[in-house]
Image: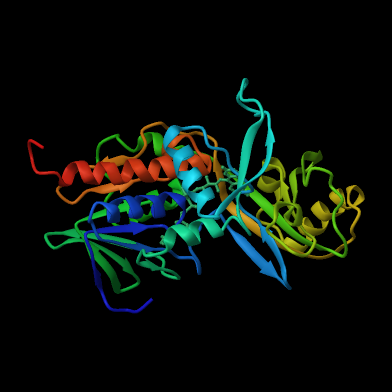
Amino acid sequence: MSKALKTTDVIVVGAGMAGLTAARELNKAGISTVILDKRRAPGGRMATRTIDGARFDHGAQHFSARSEQFTSRVDELRNAGVVSEWYRADSRTTPGRLRESRFVGSGGMRRIPEHLANDLDVQTSVTVDKLIRDAAGITAVTGDIALARGSAIVLTPPVPQLLNLLRASNLLPGSSILDPLESVPYNPSLAVMATLDAPSGLPDGHLAEPSADVAWIADNQHKGTSQLPALTIHSTADFASAHVGSDWSGWTKHLADQVAPMLDGRIVHTVGHRWMYAEPRTTFDSGAIVLESDKPIVLAGEVFAGAKVEGAFLSGLAAANAILERSKPPGT
Ligand SMILES: Cc1cc2nc3c(=O)[nH]c(=O)nc-3n(C[C@H](O)[C@H](O)[C@H](O)COP(=O)(O)OP(=O)(O)OC[C@H]3O[C@@H](n4cnc5c(N)ncnc54)[C@H](O)[C@@H]3O)c2cc1C
């Protein structure tokens, strides 16, 4: 990003589903935003990577839509050709949800955040490591460089990173409002992106819990993400917890060896990716948390609205609404 200080109404930290949704809602209401993200591209955990022409979704695999708000947004995205239905299945976690649609980004999950980022001011490859709140507003800082200044900020990193940022900025409130967040555990996940020399032959393009240490495998060719045979392997949370700190070549080979006998194509190349904060094990239903002041700090992200892609979307909406409520003239 350019090093010139950006001035805006609202700074958003994080260009995942929550941050992009919040920024879009605010922009729609005439409120300017600047989104800052430490990664090279928007999307956060909705991530797609290309390796030697094969494309892999290595974060979120698919999503469902249950709320009215998210269903109508997904319909819009389907009409725009950005989202497609991959398959339908009964929910494994919520009884009674039969033949539920599983949606994916058309051509890869990252297509969705890329689409949502259109027309937004998204600055990538910048890590916000401190916030300064003073009479001039809230300033997001990296090192000794002021990146952006606004009169409110929405923070969407996973909770441990979010609390670290507030702590480093001396902005943790003295009250107990954030105590429940201090103990939010996250499951890590290890992902293996495996290129095959022929199609996988998986009849439904995916398998849940195919072996002891593997939670899920998905055929990216079957999904429409990749033209070439490309398999994503996700470890179980237990395996990831035990191996997340060890050298990637060991766990990559171990996970690939467990699934190789199930495939028609042979695995010819593997690349590993560590997700330190794949999914929270506790969630809240507040939508977003506002640290009150005339320059509000709004905490948002999947964890505040039931997790997953849909939770991130709903939390982004809640964060935008919280700011819009506070910007209304009294009595309206
Ligand atoms: C392996 C895996 C599989 C999953 N499978 C599914 C699935 O099948 N279905 C489903 O619905 N969900 C799934 N999820 C969960 C889903 O991806 C997330 O719930 C959702 O994408 C979270 O969105 P978010 O905007 O809240 O957070 P994120 O997407 O994590 O966005 C937060 C952003 O903040 C940025 N950031 C963090 N700290 C800073 C900083 N200091 N400065 C600047 N930027 C910062 C990060 O780079 C990131 O882009 C999966 C996740 C993983 C990892």
The residue positioned 60% from the left and 44% from the top of the image is: 103
Q: Image check: 242 left or right of 313? A: right
Choose between 106 and 329: the one closer to the eye: 106
Residue 138, image x, y percentages: 22, 59
Decide: is 115 above or below 86: below
Q: Nearer the viewer, residue 127 or 327?
A: 327
Residue 33 location in percent, x, y? 29, 60
Picture residue at 71% right of the left edge, 49% below the top: 234
Q: Quadrant of residue 181?
A: top left
Would residue 207 be found to the left or right of residue 15 on screen? right
Q: Quadrant of residue 314?
A: top left
Residue at the spot 39% in from the left edge and 50% down from the top edge:
21
Q: What residue sits 65% from the left and 25% below the top?
A: 98
Seen as rendered, the residue at the extreme front is 79
Give the quarter of the figure containing the N terminus: bottom left
The image's colouring method is rainbow
If the image is split into quadrants, where does the C terminus sit? top left
> Residue 196's spot in the image, x, y percent?
84, 62
